[in-house]
Amino acid sequence: MTYDSDNIFAKILRDEIPSTRVYEDADTIAFMDIMPRSDGHVLVVPKTPCRNMLDATAEQMAAVMKTVQLMSRALMVAFEADGITLQQFNETAGGQEVFHLHFHVLARHEGDRLGAPGKMGDQVVISQNADKIRASILDL
Ligand code: 5GP
């Protein structure tokens, strides 16, 4: 399995297609999922190429997990969440659709259900939710 540098997240990293970024550091970015399954649905990716967890280096995994933890804490504050769900899929059989390593970080509330996958979100609402997340990161 080889890395395809034309995958959607590689294009987002190169700013060839727009995204709603909420966080960036030297090794990772975090941006809003365009088909959110909860109000706070963020994707965390490494800046360097790898398909998924199976070909990622330990350094890529460590950098991504550091940002996943930061985003999890920010989502707890931004949405007064009760918990966080992480999702991460590897290869088609594992449910992966975009082949650049990413973790889904989802804010959860007691008794809620995740929204259906594959449904485009309202960009105005996504932008408002991104503002809440950015503000919460500053407060951590
Ligand atoms: P997965 O590979 O984890 O199964 O799914 C890819 C995820 O990327 C989905 O949750 C989907 O909504 C999201 N996604 C697909 N295309 C785009 C895009 O162009 N921009 C953003 N922000 N998210 C995307």
Image (spheres, grey):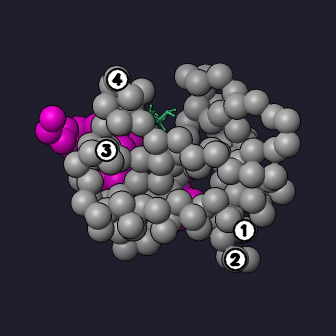
Q: Which amino acid does label 1 sit on?
A: Ser
The quadrant of the rendering that contains the C terminus is bottom right
The majority secondary structure of the magenta stretch comes to loop
Residue position for label 4 = 93
Residue drawn 19% across and 38% down? 4
Q: Badge 1: how crowded within 10 Å, few (<14), some, or many (20+)?
A: some
- Nearer the N terminus, badge 3 or badge 4? 3
For marks 1 and 3, the one nearer the N-term is 3
Callout 1–callout 3 Cβ contact below 8 Å: no
> Residue at the location (82% across, 44% down)?
109
The residues bearing labels 4 and 1 have C-alpha atoms spaced at a distance of: 36 Å
User: What whole-number distance in Å separates the C-alpha atoms at marks 3 and 2?
Assistant: 29 Å
Q: Which residue is drawn at 81% across and 52% down?
A: 82
Q: Where is residue 123 in the image (x, y as percent from the top left)?
A: 64, 38
Of labels 3 and 2, earlier in sequence is 3
Q: Are marks 3 and 2 in contact (CB under 8 Å)?
A: no
Estimate the spatial distance between the alpha carbons at disc 1 and disc 3, rounded to whole Å: 28 Å
Mark 2 — residue? 140
Amino acid tagged 3: Asn
Magenta segment boundaries in residue numbering: 1-23
The reply to whether dot 2 and dot 4 touch (C-beta < 8 Å) is: no
Q: What residue type is labelled 4?
A: Ala
Q: Residue 52 got which mark?
A: 3
Which of the marked residues, 2 or 4, is nearer the chain's N terminus?
A: 4
Can you tell which quarter of the image residue 28 is in?
Answer: bottom left
Circle 4 crowding by C-alpha within 10 Å: few under 14, some 14–19, many from 20: few
Sort mark 2 into few (<14), some (14-19) or many (20+) by Cα contacts within 10 Å: few
Q: Which residue in the structure is indicated by mark 1?
A: 136
Question: Which x, y percent locates residue 139?
Answer: 73, 77
Marks 1 and 2, how far apart in space?
7 Å
